[in-house]
Structure formats: structure tokens, C-alpha cells
Image (cartoon, coloured by chain):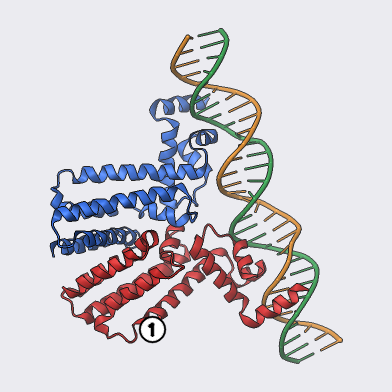
Chain colours: A blue, B red, C green, D orange
Amino acid sequence: MPQKARKRAKTSEIGVRDRLLDAADRLFYREGVRAVGIDRVLAEADAAKASLYQHFGCKDQLVASYLERRTVDARANIEAYLADTPPSQRALKFFDWVVEWAESKDFRGCPLQHTVSELTDAAHPARAIAHGQREWFAERFREWTTAAGVKDPKATARALVVLFDGAVAGSEVDGPQRASDARWMAKKLLAG
Amino acid sequence: MPQKARKRAKTSEIGVRDRLLDAADRLFYREGVRAVGIDRVLAEADAAKASLYQHFGCKDQLVASYLERRTVDARANIEAYLADTPPSQRALKFFDWVVEWAESKDFRGCPLQHTVSELTDAAHPARAIAHGQREWFAERFREWTTAAGVKDPKATARALVVLFDGAVAGSEVDGPQRASDARWMAKKLLAG
DNA sequence: GACAATACAGACAGATCGGTCTATTGTCAA
DNA sequence: TTGACAATAGACCGATCTGTCTGTATTGTC
């Protein structure tokens, strides 16, 4: 019975909920949430359909949970990346992080942007998560530009949001050069 | 016979091919190319399924034709918008156009970005169209920054691409303020 | 060993998808 | 008037989608 061995190995390693989230993350990010069906996620996670609906209720909730985990991880990731950088230089250092992200093998743009543009329904739970993450970014940029002591911290922070969006969206189509271009301009902006 | 009146009215006004393209444009741009099925397009265009397959062959080709027309229209639109502006000031004036676009009622981000992120297949005809349009933008930016006489026209042009992408992607989620933010930064960039 | 909880496999339903096909209708030119 | 042509309506096909359901196997606890 192949199930026996497989099941034992899996349940002792990672719970089925995390396996489903891992699989959803890989597939949804790579191909989009509409292009990937439930069955693909189940096969990738090596899980049963009942487990998915037990843990998440419906596909939309799985999508929301996938984005939720992405944002939590991204925040932790960024904060760790900037921990050793003095606050006055974090705005620019953040764009180093963006460049590294854009250069990473599996980079394919912003999962929040993608999902929001795929799911038009304004009441979809994914939209609230995307909105929350953008608020977080806006606040961090205001912190960083204030700490940097630039002339107009609020306007500069808004400009950095544009640079960030442009770096991510541009790198998706043109490659990581766009992220470097954004960093180049961020440097000019923060210096002047 | 309702068909009689309807048919006569329609065929004398706009050909069925253009009606299909108009319908596809509205629906694909508003909801995405995967979210909208053939039947929705047919109902919106008040056309028969056979007409769609007669003129476009398959859905992918309809998508490509929709994007093709979008790019042709956008180029003409932009060139007309900038016709009365001296070359040296076109780079900045272009961001006025972006602001107006972002403020328009039906603005919902960049159709090319959306479609490319929805259709992962690298061989899809839509990707070639998107690539061509980005080339066109890159060349225009180089022209305009050269005419503006800035210090480093090529780097500045690359930066403007980032600002443009950021303006469009940001305005989709946060509203047209992002386009104004991009213009603000473009002005600084072109002045310094 | 009995039991509840969890996860498995997969049939099934109902809807929708892209695409093909037949049959009908209106238009226009010979 | 006839015949070619373009457009219509819509049945139909096989595939795929989300979600439900039945039944079985494994695990940990009493």
C-alpha cells in the first residue's frame, strides 16, 4: 500500500494545511489564481479535497490565506533585512531588497497586484489584505523618509511608493534592470 | 421578427467584427481575459458565435486583437496629445496624459500588464504585442529626454519607464493620486 | 481493543468553458 | 428570380471548474 508510506512521511513532517498553503503559493504565484484549479493544488500538495475544504472552506479563502501569509512573510523579511541599517538610510536600503527580490529566480511580479487585478469583486477578502499591506508600506516609507531628514518627507514617501510599484511591475516584464533603475532614482530623490 | 430590425440596425451601423472587438475591450479590460468567457462577449456584442470564430479563429486571437487595437489607439492618442508641445517638454507633458488617464472613469490599470500576468504561456501572441508597446514607450522616452537636454538621457528615460509603470499600477489600487506623485517626481528628475 | 479525529481516495453534481456544427435569415448582385 | 454570401440562433461536444458526498485508512487517547 503506497498510501501507508506516503501518509506517514507527510503527516510527520508538515501538516496538511501548510502543505496546501505551500502548494497554493507556488501555483497561484506562478500562474495566477484563476488559471490554477483546486485539483492542481491538491495534486501539488498531495492532499485530499476534503482536507482543503475542511481547512479553508472555499477556494476564495485559500487565496486569501495565501496572500495573508505572503504579506506576513514579506514584512518579517523586510524588517530583518533592514535591522542592521540605521533608520536614516533604510529608505534607500529597501530598494536593495527590491533589487534582490527582482533578481530572484522565481520572481514574477507582485502577488497582490496580480490577484487584485484578477478578482474584480470588491468584496473579495483578498482586497482587504492587499489594502492592509499597502498601508503598511506607506507608513514605513513615511518613517524612513522622516528619518532620512529630507525636505518634504510625505511627498517623498508617496514618490517612493510609485518607485516601488514601478520597480516591481517593470521588472516583471523587462527584468531586474527596472528595479535598479528605481533604486537609482530613489537615491537621487533622497539625496536632493 | 425581432431579428430583422435588430440585424438591419446593427449591420448598417458597425460591422460585427468591430462590435466584437468593442465588447471584448470593455469586458476584458474591466474583468480580465480569463474571467470573461466567449458567451459573455457574444451577448455584449449581440453577435453569433460563428461570427466570432469566423473573424478571429479562437479566443486567444481575440485577446491579441483587443490588445493590438489598444496599443494602436494609445499611440495615436498620446501623439495627438503631445502634438502641440515642444519636444523638450514632452516628457513631462506625457505625465499629464497619464494623470488624465488615471482619472478617467473606467481606468483600471494597464491592460497589457494584466493580460501578460494572466497568460503565463510565453508563446501567447499577446506577449509580443506587449513587448512591442514597451519598446515603443522606451524609444519615446529616450527621444523626449534627449530633447529635454538632461544630463544622462538614457538613464533618465529608464527612470521614466519606472515612473510610468508605478503611476499606472499604483493608481489602479490607490487612485489617481499615484499618477500625480509620479508627475511630481518626473518634474524633479527632468529639472535637475 | 474501542473510539474520535484526521486525512485519504475518488465518484458525483451542476455549471461553465472553448469550440464545432447545422440550420435559418437577410442582403446584394447577376 | 436565383444564388452566393454574411450573419443569425442555438444545439451539441468534451473538458474543466468548484464544491459535496461516501467510504476507507491512519493516528493518538482512553
Q: Does residue A142 lie above or below A81 as drawn? A: below
Of the pair B32 and D12, the residue shown nearer to us: B32
Secondary structure of residue under mark 1: helix
Quarter of the image where one finds residue B182: bottom left
At label 1, the amino acid type is: Ala
Q: Does residue A49 lie above or below B11 as drawn? A: above
- Residue A128 x %, y %: 41, 49
Label 1 resides on the chain identified as B
Crowdedness near tag 1: few (<14), some (14–19) or many (≥20) residues, C-alpha within 10 Å: few
Of the pair A152 and A111, the residue shown nearer to us: A152
Which image quarter holds the C terminus of chain A? bottom left
- Residue A105 x %, y %: 31, 50
Residue A48 relative to residue A139: left or right: right
What residue lies at 63% left-to-right and 71% top-to-bottom?
Answer: B54
The answer to whether one can see residue B101 in this image is yes
- Residue B84 x %, y %: 33, 87
What residue lies at 15% left-to-right and 52% top-to-bottom?
Answer: A147
Quarter of the image where one finds residue B86: bottom left
Quarter of the image where one finds residue B158: bottom left
Residue B74 relative to residue D24: left or right: left
What residue lies at 18% left-to-right and 56% top-to-bottom?
Answer: A145
Of the pair D14 and B116, the residue shown nearer to us: B116
- Residue B173 x %, y %: 38, 58
- Please state the total of marks drawn on the protein image: 1
Which residue in the protein does label 1 denote? B80
Residue B122 relative to residue B144: left or right: right
What residue lies at 18% left-to-right and 64% top-to-bottom?
Answer: A189
The answer to whether one can see residue B61 in this image is no
